[in-house]
Amino acid sequence: MILLLVAAGAAVGAPLRYLTDRAVQSRYETTFPWGTLIVNVAGSALLGFLAALPAGEGMMALLGSGFCGALSTYSTFGYETLRLIQTGARLVAVLNVVAGIAAGLAAAGCGALLAHLVAG
């Protein structure tokens, strides 16, 4: 049952990640991978929120491992950073790493704080 919940969450998270990335990148013609940053920050915020709640195993499987795992994408972050370095955009690559890590950690912390405030 848990495996089905993870798969169901991923079935929603992966297409949402792809569509969000394409929408953002088509809107802003820039070297910086804004779409990946946005989905990674959103996934970090939601996972921070869920982790701070007394969510059950099923909820964490569906939303945490499934949805957030498929929505956020470390592999694309790594690939895009490497591609930036290979094309000579080293400063943008460094900014991508710093922004991705800092914003992801901050978003997870804000999500957890929000959960604590909501749960009272």
Image (spheres, rainbow, N blue to C red):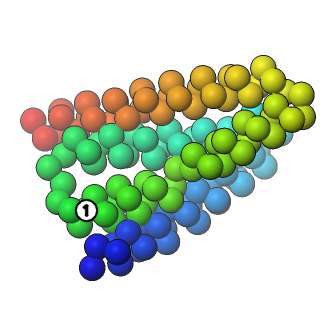
Say which residue appears at 74% left-offset and 28% top-offset.
93
In depth, the one of 95 and 83 nearer the eye is 83
| 54 relative position to 21: left or right | left
Say which residue appears at 26% left-offset and 45% top-offset.
51
Question: Could you say whether the residue bearing mark 1 is in a helix, strand or loop?
Answer: helix
Determine which residue is flagged by label 1. Answer: 59
Characterize the local packing of mark 1: few (<14), some (14-19) or many (20 or more) Cα atoms within 10 angstroms. some
In depth, the one of 90 and 115 nearer the eye is 90
In percent of width and height, residue 33 lies at: 71, 39
Q: What amino acid type is highlighted by mark number 1?
A: Met
In the image, is residue 59 above or below residue 53?
below
| 57 relative position to 93: left or right | left
In percent of width and height, residue 89 lies at: 85, 27
In percent of width and height, residue 54 lies at: 14, 49
Instruction: Tell me if I can see residue 39 in this picture.
Output: no
Say which residue appears at 18% left-offset and 34% top-offset.
116
In percent of width and height, residue 30 lies at: 81, 35
Instruction: Tell me if I can see residue 17 in this picture.
Output: yes
In the image, is residue 56 above or below residue 2?
above
In the image, is residue 4 above or below residue 63?
below
In the image, is residue 68 above or below residue 111?
below
Say which residue appears at 64% left-offset and 42% top-offset.
77
